[in-house]
């Protein structure tokens, strides 16, 4: 192996590291939410997602380096690690009483949890893409649950302005999310 091919190999490894970091930045919250939907424990869900990324890092040589295959690998790993937590804890009894008659969740709740995580991620992304004033009002109203008057007092603008900007933000979100919801519905109906 000559020096130039060795140098190229180092660059490939470094670019994979960047890809995994960007994948971590993109998927971490979704995967934590997905795991949380299964185990109902935030700290364990975060630990599980971190462990999934460690497994990904350990197996990066054998995995196909495409975003979709790595995403599928991570969701499957998080699902399996979450199910392992359930199997090895007292949560199984409570979970069975509330939701299931077996010791593992059926596919439907898993698919629903994945879809919920993806939809919430898209909603957060759509809100983040709004113009600053609309984004601020949307966050205060929809995510923090504040009333129009509270938002108006906090931002120092009229209640009517809040109402109009909130309505405009909803219209913008509806346009951005309509295609996503259509795709999700088509996917769900194909199951």
Image: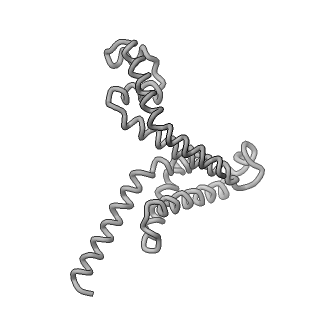
In the displayed structure image, the side of residue 82 where residue 131 appears, left or right: left
**Outermost residue toward the left in this view:** 3
Along the line of sight, which residue is nearer the eye, 116 or 131?
Answer: 131
Decide if residue 136 is in sight here: yes
Tell me the residue at 23%/86% (across/down): 2
* Residue farthest to the bottom, as pictured: 1
Asked if 136 appears above or below 96 in the picture, the reply is above
Quick one: quadrant of the N terminus? bottom left
Residue 173: quadrant of the picture: top left
Given residues 50 and 11, the one toward you in this image is 11
Position in image of residue 164 (x %, y %): 40, 18
38 on left or right of 157: right
Q: Position of residue 172 (x, y in %)?
A: 42, 31
Tell me residue 105's x, y (percent).
Answer: 69, 52
Q: Residue at x 42, y 17 (%)?
A: 163
Residue 159's x, y, as percent?
39, 13
- Indicate whether 102 appears above or below 170: below
Q: Is residue 10 left or right of residue 105?
A: left
Instruction: Classify residue 17 as left or right of residue 81.
Output: left
* Residue depicted at x 46% and y 57%: 50
């Amino acid at each position: 192996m000559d020096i130039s091919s060795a140098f190229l190999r180092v660059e490939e490894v470094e670019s994979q590291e960047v890809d995994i970091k960007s994948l971590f930045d993109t998927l971490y919250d979704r995967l934590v939410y997905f795991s949380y939907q299964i185990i109902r424990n935030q700290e364990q869900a975060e630990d599980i997602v971190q462990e999934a990324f460690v497994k990904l890092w350990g197996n990066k040589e054998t995995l196909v380096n495409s975003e979709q295959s790595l995403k599928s690998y991570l969701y499957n790993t998080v699902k399996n690690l979450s199910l392992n937590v359930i199997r090895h804890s007292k949560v199984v009894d409570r979970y069975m009483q509330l939701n299931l008659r077996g010791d593992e969740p059926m596919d439907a709740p898993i698919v629903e949890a994945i879809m919920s995580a993806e939809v919430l991620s898209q909603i957060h992304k759509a809100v983040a893409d709004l113009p600053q004033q609309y984004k601020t009002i949307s966050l205060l109203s929809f995510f923090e649950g504040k009333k129009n008057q509270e938002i108006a007092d906090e931002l120092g603008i009229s209640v009517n302005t809040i109402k109009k900007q909130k309505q405009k933000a909803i219209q913008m979100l509806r346009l951005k999310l309509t295609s996503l919801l259509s795709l999700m519905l088509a996917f769900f109906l194909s199951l």
